[in-house]
């Protein structure tokens, strides 16, 4: 079926379903298996040579995960997707598939704290340099690019600032220098709020733990390949030249536009082993069926809460990308459906102690390191997601001691507002 002819709501339900099973089952089956029987020795040899498609071992591929990957690829309009164990795994496999020791990527200064740590510490130990741009201005990214640069990396909406970079401008810079543009689209809600492929992105990574799952029940990440980047430009021999780990197979010749996502699977998953469980992939499939319905409710609730907080006497500042005073407002209007998101930030008046009292007084809203859940979540980034950052990095990321990140869930927003109101009574 050509899913490109179908709307987003239809694709999120039908893509990846097998309409020809003998059982006639409506849902996707869970295959809790580690290995698969080979029909013949020749068939097994073909699978291991990548000359024939099929299942070898669940570390590489599983029928449940394959159905989930097909659905996500259809939602984004990519040539293929790869399910992995977490959002951080998605970033790791993407970068290591493209960048070798002595090479670098250029990244946004507005990143999730875990991404910062992977970039600044773990990848550095592997010999990969991550150059953090001083600002989100496209020219500041370009100034850091040299002959060893292999990608530009941004978040479609910065965590936790909710700033939206100029995706189209950054994509042009990346392509002018012959490198792919990678976008972490976690805040883009599985492509429903934002699809970076529409604006020139080449590779999308997403923490599926968040809106794709939507219920806080499973951990996962996803990589999606747009299939349009030219890997034969001389900078990516791991894709365009013989691969010694597959007896000289050239991925771009064997798999064409899907060469990158195949590399992530047969190289990244094979060697790093960060595969999802079939049951988690099943939960992601269930979550996707209601993605757009959930996100629309959460976006509306977020605006309602932002308006309430903007007028509260104990609030210093509300940072909501749907308000025209937010620095990312214009880009959000261009790149995000509804020009908004399901997350906002608020700085309370007072200090760290009073902020802690407020958070601990909440009854409905949960104090967790989570976004995109069916439960409203309040996170204190300075003591959780960005705890490992230096003072300078905290300042660059816009994280202050009284900053709270709020991700709206599926409750009646009036109840959440009432919960906030009673919590404010604990703040002097």
Image (cartoon, rainbow, N blue to C red):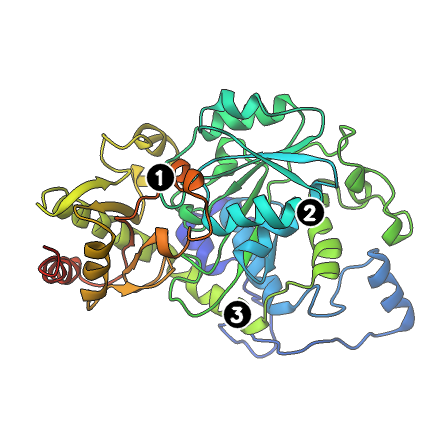
N-term mark: 1 or 3: 3
Residue at the spot x=59%, y=56% of the render?
Answer: 89
> What is the C-alpha distance between the residues marked 2 and 1?
28 Å
Residue at the spot x=40%, y=47% of the render?
Answer: 187
Residue at the spot x=62%, y=78% of the render?
Answer: 32
Residue beneath disc 2: 96
Badge 2 local density, few (<14 within 10 Å), some, or many (20+)? Answer: some
CB atoms at circles 3 and 2 under 8 Å apart?
A: no
CB atoms at circles 1 and 3 under 8 Å apart?
A: no
| Rendered image: mark on residue 398 | 1
Q: Give the SS element for disc 3.
A: helix
N-term mark: 2 or 1: 2
Q: Is residue 173 visible?
A: yes
Dividing the image into 4 quarters, which one contains the C terminus? bottom left
N-term mark: 3 or 2: 2
Residue beneath disc 3: 280
Q: Nearer the viewer, residue 171 or 382?
A: 382
Q: Give the SS element for disc 2.
A: helix
Badge 1 local density, few (<14 within 10 Å), some, or many (20+)? Answer: some
């Amino acid at each position: 079926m050509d899913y490109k002819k179908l709307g987003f709501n239809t694709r999120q339900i039908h893509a990846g379903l097998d309409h020809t099973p003998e059982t006639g089952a409506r849902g996707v089956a869970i295959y809790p298996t580690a290995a698969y029987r080979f029909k013949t020795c020749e068939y097994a040899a073909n699978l291991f040579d990548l000359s024939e498609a099929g299942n070898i071992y669940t570390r590489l591929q599983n029928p449940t995960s394959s159905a989930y990957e097909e659905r996500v690829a259809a939602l984004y309009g990519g040539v293929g997707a790869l399910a992995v164990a977490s959002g951080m795994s998605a970033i790791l496999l993407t970068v290591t598939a493209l960048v070798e020791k002595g090479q670098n990527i250029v990244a946004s200064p507005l990143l999730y704290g875990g991404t910062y740590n992977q970039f600044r510490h773990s990848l550095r130990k592997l010999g990969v340099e991550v150059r953090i741009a001083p600002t989100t201005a496209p020219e500041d990214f370009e100034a850091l690019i040299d002959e060893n640069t292999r990608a530009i990396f941004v978040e479609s909406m910065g965590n936790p600032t909710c700033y939206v970079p100029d995706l189209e401008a950054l994509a042009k810079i990346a392509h002018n220098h012959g490198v792919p543009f990678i976008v972490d689209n976690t805040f883009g809600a599985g492509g429903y709020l934002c699809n970076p492929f529409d604006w020139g992105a080449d590779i999308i990574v997403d923490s599926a733990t968040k809106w794709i799952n939507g219920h806080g029940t499973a951990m996962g990440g996803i990589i999606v390949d747009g299939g349009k980047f030219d890997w034969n430009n001389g900078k990516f021999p791991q894709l365009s030249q013989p691969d010694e780990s597959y007896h000289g197979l050239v991925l771009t010749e064997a798999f064409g536009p899907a060469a990158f996502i195949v590399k992530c699977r047969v190289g990244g998953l094979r060697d790093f082993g960060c595969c999802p469980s079939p049951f988690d992939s099943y939960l992601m499939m269930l979550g996707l069926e209601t993605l757009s319905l959930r996100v629309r409710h959460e976006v509306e609730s977020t605006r309602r809460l932002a308006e309430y907080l903007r007028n509260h006497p104990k609030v210093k500042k509300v940072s909501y990308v749907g308000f025209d005073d937010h620095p990312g407002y214009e880009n959000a209007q261009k790149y995000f459906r509804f020009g908004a998101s399901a997350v906002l930030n608020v700085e309370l008046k007072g200090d760290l102690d009073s902020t802690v009292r407020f958070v601990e007084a909440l009854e409905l809203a949960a104090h967790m390191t989570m976004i995109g859940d069916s439960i409203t979540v309040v996170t204190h980034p300075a003591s959780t997601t960005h705890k490992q950052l230096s003072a300078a990095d905290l300042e660059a990321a816009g994280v202050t001691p009284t900053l709270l990140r709020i991700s709206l869930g599926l409750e009646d927003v009036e109840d959440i507002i009432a919960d906030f109101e009673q919590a404010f009574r604990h703040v002097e």
